[in-house]
Structure formats: structure tokens, C-alpha cells
Amino acid sequence: MTPRVKYYEYVISTSEGFVNDFANKRLEECKKEMYQPMMQLADKMLSNFQYYSAETLLSDLARIFPDDQIIQSNLFIATSNTSPVTTYSGSVEVICVKPLIADTTVAFEMNYVASTDSYYITVSEFKAILQSLYAKGFCLIDPTSMADLSNTGFVTTQEVTVPEGKKPLVIILEDFSYTATREKVGMCRRLVLNDVGQVCGEYVSSNGQTVVSRSSEAIGILDAFVEEHPDFSYNGVKGVISLTGYQSIFGYVTDMDQVDDRNNALEAAGLPTINPTDKEIETNRATVQSITDKLKESGWIMASSTYGFINANHCEIGTIQNDTEKWLSQVGSITGPVSILVYPNGDFIRGSDARCVYLKEKGFRIFFGAGPTPYYTYGDNYLYFDRCMLTGDTLRNVDYTRLFNKEDVYDGSRKKN
């Protein structure tokens, strides 16, 4: 409920005469002013599966407008998709994947590269992993909800809250900027919005056709999974998407500074180089902004994986400062403020290190390293998590049975190699 409504209701309950009449009049004016924008906000919440937020908002509106049938109907939809919540005191699982292998024929038969098999998982593997996580009672949460970042000098811990019977889960999609080499090994070359505004991956299939599909990338797959299983997400949360910037963002060159790196990668992959105009760069930035806005609106959280995907703990502070300034200028200007840094390859810097102090001063206060088991800790003005890397190698060699059975998810097309 808005503060003005609360204020006038309080005045009405404690006054009489002119003051009471004035407060009643102002309350009715407030109701007229708030109705349409609040209803639009509730509709947006419902469309993005933010049922818990919608329930709170619509409950307040139902008290203010008790005879409004649209409010009652929408409130019923919200409450039908919520359940009692509880504080969770156990571990928080964090899994991480890189862009998916969309076409296994290209990846494992036509253009087999050992690193592709080692570092990436396939579309079918990701779908099977989601099914297993859902069956085991996991529920997606927002990692930023675990830390109060309102004070720049310190982080205040916040309790982990999940629906009763659920276990918290964070999904990281790492380095979704789409480097040029991935296009040659059956992976997406960029993200696009389809004709109904859904985020899709675009790739070139084994027969040379351009394919645009939600099912070709983790973003669209998880979006569709939450649509089918809203209780897999607590209040519409999806996951964290970490971005670099040195070649592109979502597969689009958005700054002239990226052109040299992009062309070097294109040339190494045997693909045509580019020579974009300022107008084309501007168009690319607008496209990426539209995709970013859609992702953020639908429950995705933006993060950094450094500008150059650098092994941060092996870099001097000057390198980190230069890299961070580039990220903030070229990527952060599109994403808006971010508080999460996903360390490339898990190469984390300890919180007291001057380099990490600098990163915290720049707004990064939630950090993800890497490790095969769930772990998180609060430090000096930061929250740190380990993340489980899901790759071809870890599917083969790491025991993740608490999350899924390898035999149930492993893509048989890998066996040909």
C-alpha cells in the first residue's frame, strides 16, 4: 500500500470535522490516481511469475477496493501459485554453465574440438539437469536477497527464504557475451528477440541453416521451464548472467574498442571480419539494450565476468583497474549498476586484498568463485559463494549425484568421441 494511503487512513481514524472530511477527500483522490498504475504493476508481476510480490500488492488493493472483481480474480491467480515460506538454514547450491552446445552434429562430428567437449554441456544435458533439480525440490532464488547492500561500507546478512519444502538454488550463466569461435562448434552466435519478444539463441545448423530458437540456449530453456513449473522459481527469479565485453555483448559489437579483438577471433575461426560504422554500433547497442531490459524484467540478474575474462588473482591492481573501468564503461552502461562479479575460472581474490577492496569500491560486493560443493560466507563488506561448474569434464569426473545422476543426463552423442 502506498504511504499516502496509509497516512490518510491514519488521519481519518484519528480526526473528525474538517480534517476528517479533507482526509477522506484526499484518500479518494489517491485511490483514483493509484488504481491504474498499481493494476499495471500487478499485471506485470503476474506475467513474470512474481506471484509472491503480486499477492502482497493485490491484497493491499483488495482492501482498498473490496468490490473490484478484477483485483479479486488476479489475487486468486497469485495465491493459487504461492505457498507458505520459511527460513532456510542449510547450504545454498550454486551451479554454473557456459553457453550451450546447440547442434551436437556440428560439435561432435563435423568440427570436433576437444575443448568444446571438455568445457561445455549440450542442450539436452541442461534440460535433463533442470528436470532432476526440480524433482529434487530445488527452487531458484536471488543471491542478492541474501545480503543487504544498502550501506556502502558493510554488508548485512539476510536470511534465506524459500517456500516450504523447497531448497535454494542459484544458476549462473557465465560469459554469455558470445565469442566468435563458438559459432564454429555448434553453439549460438548471438541472442535475438523473436516476434513475441522472447529471448532466443541463434545458431547455424549442420545443414547451414540459421536457426532461431528458445531451445538452443540456457536462457530460453530456463524461461520455458519456469513457465511450465512456476514453483521452480521463488517469485519469478531466473538466474545470473555474467558478461565480458572485449569481443561483444550477446554477440553484438557495441563499441569500436571491441572490433580488433572481434576481428582477431573471427579471422582465427575462418570467418569474415567486420568493419562496423558508428551507426551500426549504435544500432547494436540499442539491440543489446532491448535484450538486457527484457532479461532484467523477466527475472534475470546481470553480472560481470570482467571485461577481458581475466584470471583476476594473477593480475596486478593496475590491470584490474583498467579492465574494470572498461567493463563499467562499455557493459555497465547497458546493464545498469551490478553488484555481482563471477570470477573467470573461479580465480578469486581474497576480500582484504587491495585489488578486491578496489572492486568493492566499484560496487561489486557479491563474488562467485568455484568449487564442487556448496559454500558461501560473509566477509568484510562482501558475500562470497563457490559455484559448481557443469562441463563435459565435470559431468564425467565429478560426483554430482546430490543434483542429478550422470547416467540420466549425459548426452550419448559424446560417446562417439
Image (spheres, grey):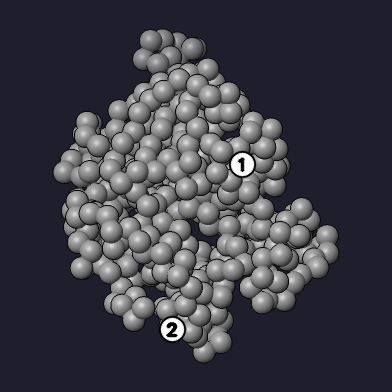
Q: For the C terminus, which image quadrant?
A: bottom left
Q: Amino acid at mark 1?
A: Gly
Most extreme residue toward the bottom is: 207
Q: Earlier in the sequence, mark 2 or mark 1?
A: 2
Position of 397 relative to 233 (above/below):
below
| Residue pointed to by mark 2 | 109
| Residue pointed to by mark 1 | 336
Q: Nearer the viewer, residue 283 or 44?
A: 283
Position of 413 relative to 174 (above/below):
below
Residue 146 percent coordinates (x, y): 37, 31
Q: Are marks 2 and 1 in contact (CB under 8 Å)?
A: no
Q: CA distance from mark 2 to mark 1?
A: 41 Å
Q: Nearer the viewer, residue 384 or 280?
A: 384
Q: Amino acid at mark 2?
A: Glu
Few, some or many C-alpha atoms within 10 Å of disc 1 (few <14, some 14-19, many ≥20)? few
Q: For the N terminus, which image quadrant?
A: top left
Few, some or many C-alpha atoms within 10 Å of disc 2 (few <14, some 14-19, many ≥20)? some
Q: Does residue 348 appear anywhere in the picture?
A: yes
Residue at 78% over, 56% down: 256
Q: Nearer the viewer, residue 407 or 254?
A: 407
Residue 139 percent coordinates (x, y): 27, 48
Residue 273 percent coordinates (x, y): 74, 72
Foreground: disc 2 or disc 1: 2
Position of 206 relative to 409 (above/below):
below
